[in-house]
């Protein structure tokens, strides 16, 4: 998987959370993910397509981090993941993908974005619908962990 294509998503996630929720994330070591079970409690998944590639990205948060972000962004902290938290995760997924799309556009990559789908609950699954491998990058913060998963199929070489 091309680092030039992946790094804008990582930078965008860190930027969005630092700017919108005063939350600093530290990226961990990327690895290939073999299973579909999520490593967090709430995920935003978004499909992307261009003439050259199709794929998807997911942003997953542990409940403690999602609730902390909610509190910092909106001034209220629910007791558990609710509809407002899942809406917020959808918005963060949109902002991360939009930010990465802008950075990638400067490098000659262009793609269309779908509307994010939100999945929550312990051991929920994320299916990327791609033939290629899924790369997962963990992030740590003082309030919990987040994960980005990226999977893309190259359609044209």
Image: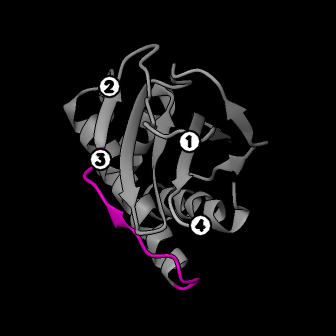
**Left or right of 94, for residue 7:** right
Give the spatial CA distance, label 1 vs label 2.
21 Å
Query: Mark 3 or mark 2, which is nearer to you?
Result: 3
**Of the image marks 3 and 2, the number of the one nearer the N terminus:** 2
The quarter of the picture where the C terminus appears is bottom right
Label 2 environment density (alpha carbons within 10 Å; few <14, some 14–19, many ≥20):
some
Earlier in the chain: of badge 1 and badge 4, it is: 4
Q: Which residue, given by chain and number where applicable, does mark 2 sit on?
A: 81
Question: Which residue is depicted at the point 40% across and 29% down?
Answer: 42
Q: Report the residue marked by disc 4.
A: 8
User: Residue placed at 51% from the left, 24% from the top?
Assistant: 38
What is the distance, in whole Å, between disc 1 and disc 4 at their CAs? 13 Å
Mark 3 or mark 4: name the one nearer the start of the chain. 4
**Mark 3 vs mark 2, CA separation in Å:** 17 Å
Crowding at dot 1, Cα within 10 Å, few <14 / some 14-19 / many 20+, comes out as many
Camera-nearest residue between 67 and 28: 28
Q: Nearer the viewer, residue 97 or 135?
A: 135
Q: Quadrant of residue 126?
A: top left
- In which image quadrant can residue 137 be found? top right
Which residue position is annotated with label 1?
Answer: 149
Could you tell me how far apart the alpha carbons at marks 3 and 4 are, in whole angstroms? 18 Å
Q: Which mark is residue 124?
A: none
Q: Indicate the quadrant containing the N terminus: top left, top right, bottom left or bottom right.
A: bottom right
Give the answer, above or below, for where 52 lies relative to 92. below
- Marks 1/4 in contact by CB < 8 Å: the verdict is no
Residue 76 visible in rendering? no
Q: Which mark is residue 116?
A: 3
Q: Residue furthest right?
A: 29
């Amino acid at each position: 998987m091309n680092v030039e294509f992946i790094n804008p998503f990582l930078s965008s996630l860190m930027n969005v959370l630092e700017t919108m929720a005063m939350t600093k994330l530290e990226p961990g070591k990327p690895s290939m993910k073999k299973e579909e079970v999520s490593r967090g409690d709430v995920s935003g998944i978004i499909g992307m397509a261009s003439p050259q590639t199709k794929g998807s990205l997911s942003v997953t948060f542990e409940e403690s981090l999602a609730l902390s972000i909610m509190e910092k962004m909106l001034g209220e902290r629910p007791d558990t993941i609710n509809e407002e938290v899942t809406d917020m995760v959808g918005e963060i997924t949109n902002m991360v993908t939009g930010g990465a799309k802008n950075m990638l556009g400067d490098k000659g990559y262009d793609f269309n974005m779908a509307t994010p789908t939100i999945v929550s609950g312990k051991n929920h699954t994320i299916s990327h619908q791609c033939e290629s491998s899924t790369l997962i990058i963990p992030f740590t913060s003082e309030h919990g962990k987040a994960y980005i998963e990226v999977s893309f199929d190259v359609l044209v070489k």
